[in-house]
Image (cartoon, rainbow, N blue to C red):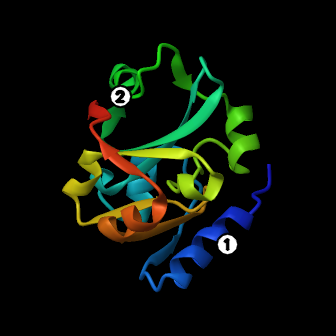
Amino acid sequence: MSEDLAVHERIIGLLRSRGIPFTLLEHDHVHTSADAAKVRGTRLEEAAKALVLKDRTNDKLFMCVVSGHRRLDLKLIKEMLHAKNVSLASPDEVLVATGCEVGTVPPFPVLFGMDGYADEGIFENERVVFSAASHYKSIRMRAEEWKAVAGVAVAGLARPQ
């Protein structure tokens, strides 16, 4: 599938319109956070993984963002949202909601009109690096500046892998 870089351009536009400095990284095709860290020359702990989930009780999609070295804890998510039936959204649901394939969704729920939550562990690092709506492009920027524009609330969502 060829990549639609419209979402990539929206991220770049958002950051530039706010005067937020960032570094655009171009690299070989990657699928996992560990692979991405290697080709980016960054640490796995800096990776901000965007996961689209679905509260199946009310059919609502939302996004959680966790560090590359941590694993989302669905039990914590369910408790936080007072939800009984939460799971990862299907690849088709992710594509329809974001225009991105799983693995390329950028951690900007604000761009997709979704509620968003960031694991507090992300802010143990000064910088975050994430997919820029592409298997071949990533962005690295200060974590606090990302939080200011991403549209996320901070909570405890993950545990070490």
Q: Residues within 10 Å of mark 2 (few under 14, many from 20)?
A: few
Q: Which residue occupies the foreground of this view, 14 or 141?
A: 14
Identify the residue position indicated by label 1 in the image.
9
Q: Is residue 122 left or right of residue 30?
A: left
Q: Earlier in the sequence, mark 1 or mark 2?
A: 1
- Estimate the x, y position of residue 80 in percent, counting from the top left: 35, 28
- Estimate the x, y position of residue 17 in percent, counting from the top left: 55, 83
Identify the residue position indicated by label 2 in the image.
80
**Please, what is the three-letter code of the amino acid marked with disc 1?**
Glu
- Number of dots carrying numbers: 2
Q: Which residue occupies the foreground of this view, 154 or 25?
A: 154
Instruction: Kindly indicate the quadrant of the structure image that contains residue 78.
Output: top left
Q: Which residue occupies the foreground of this view, 29 or 17?
A: 17
**SS label for mark 2:** helix
**Please, what is the three-letter code of the amino acid marked with disc 2?**
Met
Query: Residue 57 bears which disc, if any?
Result: none
Residue at 41%, 21% in the rendered image: 82
- Estimate the x, y position of residue 96 in percent, counting from the top left: 76, 41
Instruction: Kindly indicate the quadrant of the structure image that contains residue 71.
Output: top left
Location of residue 106 with respect to 86 vertically, above or below: below
Residue at 56%, 57% in the rendered image: 110
Q: Residue furthest right?
A: 1
Q: Residues within 10 Å of mark 1 (few under 14, many from 20)?
A: few
- Estimate the x, y position of residue 143 in percent, counting from the top left: 32, 64
Location of residue 80 with respect to 98 vertically, above or below: above
Q: Residue furthest bottom?
A: 19
Q: Is residue 83 left or right of residue 76?
A: right
